[in-house]
């Protein structure tokens, strides 16, 4: 099994160029002669293969490498309690960590191992594997890096000088060396699994929408296909070897259209966005800062000049944002109750409040604390019990030296150290929250405490509810705290609040120079509902929807799209909304896209039925992707379930067509990350020798998604695993 992994490669462009005549001097050939010959004439071509979930690299490759539902939902994720960053795309800390025995595998692999989810490559013993450089990489190929440097630097001085002036392209040297080694490994009959990863097209398409530049990158990939295919034909296992060309997502790129970027980080730091100190995994606008050259950065706090009560206190970031968001932004906000408590503590500690106002503020502080005290105490008790169980497990583990040559033992040592560090961070969080919950109004004196002793620094605390996000407290009111007529604190008028759904939906740019790009960058906002079985989509006050899921006693999960309006949550946690009739303008635009299926759209249907009916629409399988991204079946292990829950964002902000939120660099050429079909339609082409049984010259119109890849490959290999959730592609394996 030889798998060529091409990051970001869109099926539509491969389709177009594989049928476009090559031009003068190349009669009878297309722009992509090898892809057309290998897969078009001698293999199977899936025309409708889709990302399941967001079209971002870390989530998408995790699905393709495991065949399991999403565990990783963004390119970077943050633990709400500790703000530990899981930075899945940063290679440099991994290489240094490997050299110092602090890591054995990439960050995403470590997380999947923690959750006992194997990769496709794990089905093969190490001596049967050849793995290229990629996001879900086990170990480091030091010899490959060394040899690539020798080949890359072993050129004439003038060539090296010219490249030094424009920037060394080490990645090309690494790819060339990896290709040489893969072709050599094909001669070894013992090696059964080989893969090769290239991000060249993805990088070019982010930078420019120029047709020639993108075509050149795809033509280079076509040449790679030809070289690998020729090497397979000369290998001892040619008749039983399959070659796969696979991509993780598509790319929203169009010649003549400039992908516009909107600075959500700046917006959240502004007064309109709440004046947040924002934590990100990279420096914003990396290319324009010397600090951006530091490849080891995974935590950057951008302070707000407009913070209403945390000016200069960057130990209290109140928002986290994934900079590699592309066409979406995953947003986590500090728990709203912690905001209220800290503002009241600040007022009681540092402001000279009149006696009656001081008493009202003190009562408000404890009534606010009492409202969450039972739930937070239960959570701390459960966390303490889970950490005690973890401690018992760690003490029962046999000791192991990190410097051992045995990779399995090194992985065990690394995991134990990570769990100890993780437990210590949770323990610190729990210590501060426990001290807060022990406060009593009978003997409370705010002068005896420092705020950081009661409000955990570098923590978002528990997740926010829908009501929190609709009434999010960002500071005291402009006139300060206000008494109600009955002498209590007027909680409505004493604080400045933001409804983040309305506020984000109202963002618009004043000077839009592209007629094909909307002036409002936000398409819709998605948030999980408290029932953990539905997703709320906000496209306006009267253009909202609930994507509801249910699992019948027999049969697969079913999904329903319910148009609603004016959804709110009351203080008791009850959700209220108006049922409305179908019409244009609802999120995902199914009503406009499927005018002949409007009655069908109102019913419950399986995922398979939804995929078959909606995959050709503008948002393709977005209705399935949103449930995959926002909902998950609970884990059996309580501690594992806690860690999964704490990594989830409060809500997703989806960008409109040709907009992006990539504050790291605002890619002008194109982006991905949304549920738009142009971004989710990826590549799966399969060809093989005459004993593989792979059909020749077959075009598959039936839609499939990421979860079908691993079960199909394993079935081709004669190793089917019936417990994998995705269906096998029956056109490939009848």
Image: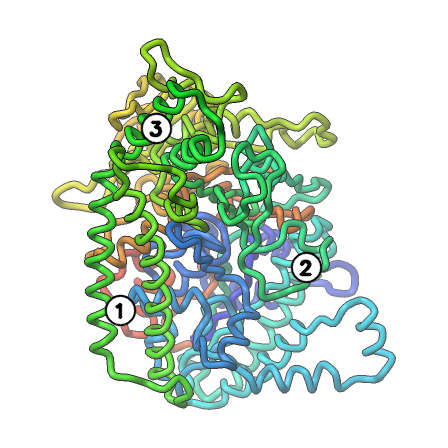
What residue did someone put label 1 on?
Answer: 720
Q: Kindly report the distance in space between the C-alpha atoms of the residues bearing marks 1 and 2.
A: 49 Å
At 49% from the left edge and 22% from the top edge, which residue is drawn?
480
Q: Kindly report the distance in space between the C-alpha atoms of the residues bearing marks 2 and 3.
A: 44 Å
Please say which color scheme the image uses: rainbow
Circle 2 — which element? helix
At 69% from the left edge and 25% from the top edge, which residue is drawn?
510
Residue 488 vs 345, above or below: the answer is above
Foreground disc of the pair 1, 2: 2
Q: Nearer the viewer, residue 540 or 422?
A: 422
What residue did someone put label 2 on?
Answer: 291
Dividing the image into 4 quarters, which one contains the N terminus? Answer: bottom left
Q: Nearer the viewer, residue 361 or 304?
A: 361
Dividing the image into 4 quarters, which one contains the C terminus? Answer: bottom left
Residue 114 placement (x, y as % from top left): 32, 67
Circle 1 — which element? loop
Residue 643 vs 123, above or below: the answer is above
Circle 3 — which element? helix
Crowdedness near tag 2: few (<14), some (14–19) or many (≥20) residues, C-alpha within 10 Å: few
Residue 696 placement (x, y as % from top left): 45, 66
Crowdedness near tag 1: few (<14), some (14–19) or many (≥20) residues, C-alpha within 10 Å: some
Q: Quadrant of residue 372?
A: top left
Which is nearer the N-term, disc 1 or disc 2?
2
Crowdedness near tag 3: few (<14), some (14–19) or many (≥20) residues, C-alpha within 10 Å: many
- Left or right of residue 488: residue 316: right
């Amino acid at each position: 099994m030889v798998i060529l992994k091409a990051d970001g490669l869109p099926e539509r462009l491969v389709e177009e160029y594989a049928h476009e005549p090559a031009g003068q001097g190349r009669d009878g050939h297309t722009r992509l002669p090898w892809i057309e010959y290998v897969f078009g004439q001698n293999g199977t071509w899936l025309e409708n293969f889709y990302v399941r979930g967001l079209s971002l690299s870390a989530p998408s490759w995790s699905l393709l490498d495991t065949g399991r539902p999403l565990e990783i939902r963004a390119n970077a994720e943050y633990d709400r309690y500790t703000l530990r960053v899981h930075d899945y795309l940063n290679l440099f800390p991994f290489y240094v960590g490997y050299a110092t025995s602090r890591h054995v595998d990439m960050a995403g692999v470590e997380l999947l191992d923690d959750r006992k989810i194997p990769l496709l490559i794990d089905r093969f013993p190490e001596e049967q594997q050849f793995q290229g450089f990629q996001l879900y990489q086990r170990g480091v190929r030091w010899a490959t890096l060394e040899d690539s440097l020798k080949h890359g630097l072993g050129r004439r001085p003038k060539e090296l000088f010219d490249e030094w002036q424009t920037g060394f392209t080490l990645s090309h040297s690494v790819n060339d060396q990896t290709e040489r080694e893969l072709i050599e490994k094909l001669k070894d009959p013992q090696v059964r699994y080989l893969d090769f990863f290239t991000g060249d097209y993805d990088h070019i398409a982010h930078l420019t929408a120029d047709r020639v530049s993108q075509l050149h990158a795809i033509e280079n990939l076509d040449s790679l296909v030809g070289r690998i295919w020729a090497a397979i034909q000369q290998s001892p296992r040619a008749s039983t070897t399959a070659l796969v060309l696979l991509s993780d997502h598509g790319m929203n790129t169009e010649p003549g259209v400039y992908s516009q970027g909107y600075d959500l980080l700046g917006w959240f730091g502004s007064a309109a966005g709440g004046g947040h100190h924002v934590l990100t995994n990279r420096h914003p606008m990396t290319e324009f800062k010397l600090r951006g050259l530091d490849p080891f950065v995974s935590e950057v706090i951008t302070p707000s000049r407009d913070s209403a009560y945390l000016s200069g206190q960057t130990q209290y970031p109140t928002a986290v944002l994934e900079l590699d968001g592309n066409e979406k932004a995953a947003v986590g906000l500090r728990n709203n109750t912690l905001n209220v408590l800290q503002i009241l503590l600040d007022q009681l500690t540092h402001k000279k409040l009149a006696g009656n106002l001081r008493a009202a503020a003190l009562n408000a502080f404890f009534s606010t604390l009492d409202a969450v005290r039972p739930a937070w105490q239960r959570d701390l008790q459960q966390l303490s019990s889970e950490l005690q169980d973890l401690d018992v497990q760690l003490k029962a583990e046999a000791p192991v030296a990190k410097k051992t040559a045995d990779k399995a033992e090194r992985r065990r040592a690394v995991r134990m150290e990570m769990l100890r560090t993780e437990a210590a961070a949770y323990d610190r969080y729990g210590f501060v929250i426990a001290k807060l919950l022990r406060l009593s109004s009978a003997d409370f004196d705010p002068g005896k405490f420092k705020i950081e002793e009661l409000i955990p620094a570098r923590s978002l605390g528990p997740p926010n509810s829908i009501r929190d996000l609709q009434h999010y407290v960002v500071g005291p009111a402009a006139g300060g705290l206000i008494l109600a007529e009955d002498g209590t604190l007027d909680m409505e008028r004493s604080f400045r609040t933001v409804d983040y759904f309305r506020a984000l939906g109202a963002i618009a740019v004043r000077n839009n120079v592209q007629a094909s790009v909307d002036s409002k960058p936000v398409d819709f906002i998605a948030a999980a509902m408290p029932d953990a079985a539905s997703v709320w989509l906000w496209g306006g006050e009267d253009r909202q929807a609930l994507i509801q899921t249910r699992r019948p006693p027999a049969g697969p999960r079913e999904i329903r799209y319910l148009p609603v309006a004016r959804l709110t949550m009351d203080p008791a946690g009850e959700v209220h909304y108006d049922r409305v009739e179908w019409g244009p303008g609802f999120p995902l635009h199914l009503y406009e896209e499927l005018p002949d299926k409007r009655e069908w759209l109102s019913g419950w249907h399986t995922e398979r039925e939804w995929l078959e009916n909606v995959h050709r629409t503008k948002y393709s399988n977005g209705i399935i992707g949103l449930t995959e991204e926002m909902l998950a079946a609970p884990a059996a292990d309580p501690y594992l379930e806690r860690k999964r829950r704490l990594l989830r964002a409060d809500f997703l902000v989806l960008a409109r067509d040709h907009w992006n939120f990539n504050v790291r660099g605002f890619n002008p050429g194109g982006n991905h990350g949304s549920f738009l079909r142009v971004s989710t339609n990826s590549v799966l082409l399969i060809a093989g020798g005459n004993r593989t049984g792979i059909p020749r010259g077959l075009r598959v119109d039936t839609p499939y998604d990421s979860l079908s890849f691993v079960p199909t490959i394993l079935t081709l290999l004669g190793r089917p695993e019936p417990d994998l959730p995705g269906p096998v592609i029956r056109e490939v394996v009848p």
